[in-house]
Amino acid sequence: MQVNIKNLVSMTEANQNFSKVAKMVDENGAAVVLKNNVPRYVIIDYSKIQEDSIADDQAVEDIAKRILSKHAKAFEELAK
């Protein structure tokens, strides 16, 4: 994950002004909360999780198809 400097917010600021953090997420897609000046938490839009999940499922299906086609003869023999 690439971190944009505009997406960084301190823990103190996140605690005191969460609506600002939510606005950052709405505008930039994510916010990184720093604790002791070290990235500690990532806040993202919930819909991004669902998109990533769908993409991961598609990747698994693509890989499975490639493996099945590559080793089709072996699977046919095993099925006998």
Image (spheres, helix red, strand yellow):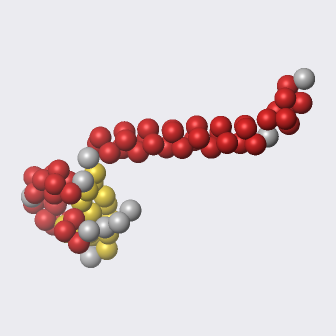
Q: Is residue 13 above or below residue 46?
A: below
* Nearer to the camera, 70 or 58: 70
Where residue 5 appears, as percent x and y from the top left, is: 23, 72
Q: Is residue 9 above or below residue 78?
A: below
Residue depicted at 51% across the width and 39% down the height: 58
Q: How many marks?
A: 0
Where residue 47 appears, as percent x and y from the top left, is: 29, 40
* Nearer to the camera, 45 or 68: 68
Q: Quadrant of residue 3?
A: bottom left
Residue 33 appears in the rendering: no
Where residue 51 appears, as percent x and y from the top left, is: 37, 41
- Say whether residue 54 is left or right of residue 10: right
Q: Is residue 78 above or below residue 19?
A: above
Where residue 31 appears, as percent x and y from the top left, is: 24, 59
Residue depicted at 24% across the width and 53% down the height: 29
- Location of the C terminus by quadrant is top right
**Furthest residue toward bottom:** 37
* Nearer to the camera, 45 or 63: 63
Residue depicted at 26% across the width and 56% down the height: 30
**Furthest residue toward top:** 80
- Location of the N terminus by quadrant is bottom left
Q: Is residue 36 above or below residue 1?
A: below
Residue 68 appears in the rendering: yes
